[in-house]
Amino acid sequence: MMQEHLSIFLVILPLVAAPIVAIMPRGRYAWAFSFVVAMVCAVIAGQQLWSVTHHGVISYALGGWAPPWGIEYRIDSVNAFIAVIIAGIAAITLPYALLSVEKEIPEHKQPLFYSAFLLCFAGLLGITQTGDIFNVFVFLEISSLSTYALISMGQKRQALTSAYQYLIMGTLGATFFLIGVGLLYSQTGTLNMMDLAKLLPDVVGLKTVHTGFAFILIGIALKLALFPLHLWLPNAYTYAPTVITVFLAATATKVAVYVMLRILFTIFPDGFVAASPAGDLFIILGIAGVIIASVYAIYQTNVKRLLAYSSVAQIGYIALGIGFATSLGLTASIVHLFNHALMKGALFMAVGAIIYRIGTSHISELNGLGRKMPWTFAAIIIAGLSLIGVPGTAGFISKWYLVLAALEQQAWFAVAIILLGSLLAVIYIGKIVETLYFKPAKEKQTTIQEAPILLLAPTWLLVIANIYFGLNTELTVGIAEQAVQALVGTPK
Amino acid sequence: MDFLIGHYNYWVAIFLMMIGFYTVISHGNLVKKIIGLNIFQVSVFLLYISMSTVTGGAAPIITEGVQLYSNPLPHVLILTAIVVGVATTALGLALVVRIKEAYGTIEEDEIHEQDHSL
């Protein structure tokens, strides 16, 4: 009984905390309060995952209205796992936020900043917890709207135009999703995901359902920045405040991937994706995304932007796994979801530490900084190796599973693409490393010191996680396999 | 012909949807884009409301002697969606005000010229 209430607390806690934080007089108080909330949420999310894997699905009827009429929060091993990623990343990002935000956001705006952060956090957690498809739309908009506001708080004026661009594209995506949900509702009369999964097989031949499917697909693809719908992402990640880039890169697109998985494999009946053009579409766009975005990344002169393009490429890998539509492919996607959060979180944090010291992430300003900031530099190297997929790091595990999935399908071309993508990653990570270490330092930078411990500790926590999950795959792969079972399993 | 007339509110919804979508894509003025986005969203509201009609059904208010009601759920959903739409518009316009302060213009091409990066 207590368990269900804990699950709803995961959403309510940050949602209630957000307005409280907004009226706090000083940034430090707001930060401390947000940190406590994020820690509590992380603990609850961890406990929830444990409970789901040991005792099975948690179902909570909001306001006591029995599903499918009322809104149901339904947590199985997929969303419990995603919730752990989000809450965990938030709890690691916030200690990092204290110094970074004090440097980048004016004092009087800091409480509002943390308030918007908590709202975004609540929205993302809400998407994972809910079992109601319209509720997904509402939480999607809660998280998106606060994200737009957070991005616009970046220091450069381009932050405003990036936020505006994202607002237009994000709202179009969400509205497409809304149209799709409406069309599905008109044929089934239900919004509950499990109920939809039960009712859809009877009407799955109808054109309305196919149209709804297409609308939802495009809407979510916009949100998860699937190539070529990724145009909002590089700008948003480049100009957002450092903390927000870290948080978004590690969570926002992951949640969109989760919604996509849920809709493709839980709501629509088995074999629907494989029979529809969607599966091929994912493979083609995934391949195109991996190659083109990686090549773009090589030519970037701003490290944040370089990593943003790399994120688009990584989403290409995830899309490949979805496109295979086999349990091995989905396992690879879910594992990569988690591992990519770890490595991109670590990389953006390390780059943020450099920005904290020199105020820019333009590659021409970074010459020789690696020797001034050895710990930050080491973090970039290890997280970069993980991004490339070197054995012993988390990135290797997800690429390994992806290659296995491709081999199982005898998709030799996809295998070649995955390897080529890793090679391209070697080039762009190599470019950062070369500038940081091998180029002579500029004279004015001789006084630069190592980043403060408060920035380094969270970065290294993620770096160590990268190594740990590269050596011990029991947890991630085990849960991912369970999650795939929960995704494709028939509703009871 | 029946198909055309019988579904006229759907045609209106599609028509508005395309007008809104086209405005968002084609116009360079940031305020006009927001207006286009608004029209696009409103068309979806119409789509939902049209779906909720039950042939011969009364308005979903409990009245004695009425057996058949229209479906009230889409109305409730759309109330939520309207709130979301209002929030999006407000935030979008607030961003436009800030962009005007920062760039001195709200025309997309002039902003591009000033930045070169976007």
Image (cartoon, grey):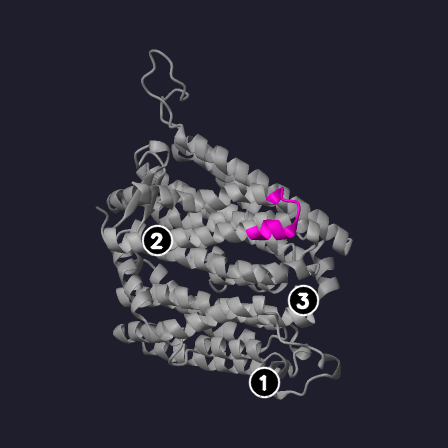
The answer to whether the residues at label 3 and label 1 have Cβ atoms under 8 Å apart is no
Asked if labels 3 and 2 share a chain, the reply is no
Decide whether residue A25 is among the magenta residues. yes
Q: Position of residue A173 (x, y in %)?
A: 49, 51
Q: CA distance from mark 1 to mark 2?
A: 43 Å
Q: Residue at x 56, y 71 (%)?
A: A350
Is A389 in front, or is B98? A389
Q: Which mark is residue B117?
A: 3
Q: Image quadrant of residue B114?
A: bottom right
Foreground disc of the pair 3, 1: 1
Above or below, comparing residue A15 to residue A347 in the picture: above
Q: Amino acid at mark 3?
A: Ser
Give the prevailing secondary structure in the magenta stretch: helix
Is A240 in front, or is B27? A240
Q: Position of residue A112 (x, y in %)?
A: 63, 47
Foreground disc of the pair 1, 2: 2
The chain carrying label 3 is B
Q: Amino acid at mark 2?
A: Gln
Foreground disc of the pair 3, 2: 2
Which segment did they paint magenta? Answer: A22-32
Q: Amino acid at mark 1?
A: Glu
